Amino acid sequence: MRGTGGATGRFRLAAPWLGLADDIEGTDQLSGWVADDMEADALAALAALAAGPVGATLTRLTAPGAGPLAVLGDVRVTDRFRSGSGALRITLEWPARLRGTTSPSGGGVVRHGVPQARTGEDCVCERHDCGGLDPVLWCAEHGDEIAPVLDWHAGGGLRCAQLARGRAASA
């Protein structure tokens, strides 16, 4: 996980349960027991990462039975339950529209930016079915110095699929 200030942390949950929503209006949840070897400091770090104004970014989530996922911000700790034996179960939650795929380098979520205005013929950015693109430095229209206005969403996620279906239907 990466917090809004750039701080990062790596956490492991025992007996994880991952609940993924079916539509972008839903909420995804991950819960599990804090591993015995996780110190109180690590748990405090997890809560601090997720407590920022826009939550934390889940840069890589691996769980049994699920491919590597990532979440583009707004991950929060929503529940803590301490059993009679002292074990702690936590629940992380985020809007399903922010879920996407992990970049091949493992550096976080793949992001697509949908331009607010129509792109020109000289655009050399990689385009996606959702209408989004990946700006490249050498693109005269979307290069690094221009800072184009783009509507960012998590690539490969529910919002990306919804946009792609909408574009296919209108074509």
Image: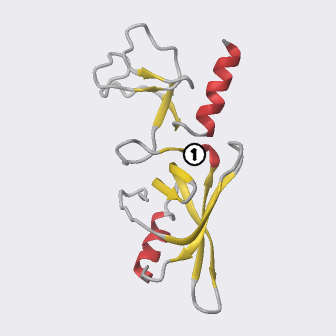
Residue 19, horizontal then vertical, whole percent: 66, 57
In this rendering, the answer to whether 86 lies above or below 99 is below
In the rendered structure, the answer to whether residue 64 lies left or right of residue 29 reads left
In this rendering, the answer to whether 130 lies above or below 27 is above
Q: Quadrant of the N terminus?
A: bottom left
Residue at image point 49% right, 61% down: 52
Residue at image point 53% right, 59% down: 63
Instruction: Identify the coloring.
Output: secondary structure
> Between residues 4 and 165, which one lies in front from this camera angle?
165
> Between residues 142 and 124, which one lies in front from this camera angle?
124
Question: What is the three-letter code of the residue carrying label 1?
Answer: Leu
In the rendered structure, the answer to whether residue 28 lies left or right of residue 10 reads right
Residue 31, horizontal then vertical, whole percent: 61, 67
Residue 56, horizontal then vertical, whole percent: 48, 57
The local secondary structure at tag 1 comes to helix
Residue designated by label 1 = 98
